[in-house]
């Protein structure tokens, strides 16, 4: 295993904690001390299963300007609000997500964004580190700018994938609370506020991306240890079955994917290096071909399709000499076959997820520190 590959696998079990000056060298479960991060802290039992009201709001306020430097001591408890000098294409919600989190996937159904899990804290002891996840289902209503909670996800997870299909939310794989990569399929019905379990995927993976197209949900990439991550997986919700439906040309995890014009664009991620490359998958032929690369490598970022164009925002580069958050927003226009930088995020985030609601790019969850956990609880939007 190369050093780079070791770093990647390591990052999926924990978020490296440079902030705390701790060298995390193992992902083994052992007695651990919870590292407190301001308002994030609640008893373990409530983090795992609570559906109570959001954490108390903090009194600290930071006015956001394009040049604002967010200090580690400020960020976890800060409530950020737009300033008059901020690009009017951006908006920041004043409300906060219940149990803020990162490394979560989302699904959008009827104008609501469903966030069924994610990483909420870091635990370390004796040089070892493990992540702590939530199963709290947070639901954001874009019309009222409010959060509620639903029936908790059956398993507390981070680095899972999610997709909305036919009015229901599907989650796949992920890294469980007991530090195991899983193959689970779970289905949430908003009308019943209930979860059911579907057929397990053929392989255990985390850090992949799920996309609904036609009658299927496709699963791309991810990390599965020694297991197969080349294969493209296809799930058929109608009969709850899985099958292999092609193969990637490039291994990639912390990847994003979107459907456009009957094809699926598999974007960025990382493996032995941070990736800007793109693959275009044709469900009819089950083949992939290279697509135009993004301007910047990025992993753990949000991607959506708006008005026939692909938008990506955020992400991180951790395999470079100096790890950093990617702040740029890029747009791909299929008519020209080119990517262009269209904006800069007011709060750069990685481990962030996105949704298109009525032509607006909603960005949810994530962390503003590369390779670290400091979950951001406010919704950010970008209107192209």
Image (cartoon, helix red, strand yellow):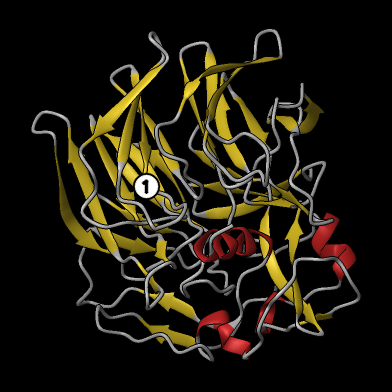
Looking at this view, name the residue that lies furthest to the front. 1
* Residue depicted at 38% across the width and 9% down the height: 285
* Residue depicted at 20% across the width and 40% down the height: 332
- Place of residue 220 in the rendered image (x, y in percent of width and height, measured from the top left): 51, 33
* Residue 384 visible in the picture: no
* Residue depicted at 70% across the width and 8% down the height: 239
Instruction: Tell me the quadrant of the picture where the N terminus can be found.
Output: bottom right
* Residue 19 visible in the picture: yes
Q: Which residue is mark 1?
A: 268
Q: How many marks?
A: 1
- Place of residue 81 in the rendered image (x, y in percent of width and height, measured from the top left): 39, 75
Residue at disc 1, secondary structure:
loop
- Place of residue 316 in the rendered image (x, y in percent of width and height, measured from the top left): 41, 64
* Residue depicted at 61% across the width and 58% down the height: 9
- Place of residue 336 in the rendered image (x, y in percent of width and height, measured from the top left): 8, 33
| Depth order, front residue of 243/302 | 243
| Depth order, front residue of 70/248 | 248
**Lateral position of residue 77 relative to residue 198, left or right:** left
The answer to whether 134 is drawn above or below residue 357 in the figure is below
**Lateral position of residue 285 relative to residue 384, left or right:** right
Looking at this view, name the residue that lies furthest to the left. 336
| Depth order, front residue of 315/364 | 315
Q: Residues within 10 Å of mark 1 (few under 14, many from 20)?
A: many
């Amino acid at each position: 295993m190369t050093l780079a590959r070791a770093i990647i696998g390591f990052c999926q079990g924990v978020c490296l904690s440079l902030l705390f000056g701790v060298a995390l060298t193992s992902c083994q479960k052992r007695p651990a001390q919870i590292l407190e991060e301001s308002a994030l802290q609640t008893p373990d039992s409530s983090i795992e299963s609570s559906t109570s009201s959001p954490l108390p709001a903090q009194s600290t306020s930071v006015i956001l300007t394009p040049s604002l430097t967010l200090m580690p001591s400020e960020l976890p408890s800060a409530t950020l609000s737009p300033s008059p000098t901020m690009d009017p294409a951006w908006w920041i919600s004043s409300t906060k997500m219940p149990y803020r989190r990162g490394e979560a996937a989302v699904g959008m159904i009827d104008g609501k964004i469903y966030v069924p899990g994610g990483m909420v804290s870091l635990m370390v002891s004796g040089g070892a580190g493990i992540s702590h996840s939530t199963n709290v289902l947070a639901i954001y209503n874009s019309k009222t700018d409010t959060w509620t909670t639903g029936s908790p996800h059956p398993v507390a997870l981070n680095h899972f994938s999610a997709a909305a299909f036919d009015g229901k939310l599907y989650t796949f794989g992920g890294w469980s609370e007991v530090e195991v990569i899983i193959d689970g399929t779970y289905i949430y019905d908003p009308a019943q506020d209930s979860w059911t379990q579907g057929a397990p995927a053929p392989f255990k993976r985390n850090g992949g991306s799920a996309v609904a197209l036609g009658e299927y949900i496709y699963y791309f990439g991810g990390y599965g240890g020694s297991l197969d991550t080349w294969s493209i997986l296809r799930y058929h919700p109608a009969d709850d079955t899985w099958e292999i439906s092609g193969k990637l040309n490039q291994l990639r995890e912390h990847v994003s994917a979107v459907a456009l014009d009957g094809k699926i664009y598999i974007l960025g991620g990382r493996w032995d290096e941070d990736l800007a490359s793109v693959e275009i998958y044709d469900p009819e032929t089950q083949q992939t071909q290279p697509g135009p690369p993004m301007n910047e490598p990025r992993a753990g970022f949000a991607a959506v399709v708006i008005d026939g164009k692909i938008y990506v925002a955020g992400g991180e580069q951790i395999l470079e000499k100096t790890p950093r958050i990617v702040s740029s927003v890029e747009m791909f226009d299929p008519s020209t076959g080119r990517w262009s930088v269209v904006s800069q995020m007011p709060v750069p985030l990685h481990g962030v997820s996105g949704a298109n609601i009525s032509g607006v790019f909603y960005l949810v969850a994530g962390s503003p520190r590369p390779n670290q956990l400091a979950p951001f609880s406010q919704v950010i939007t970008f209107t192209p």
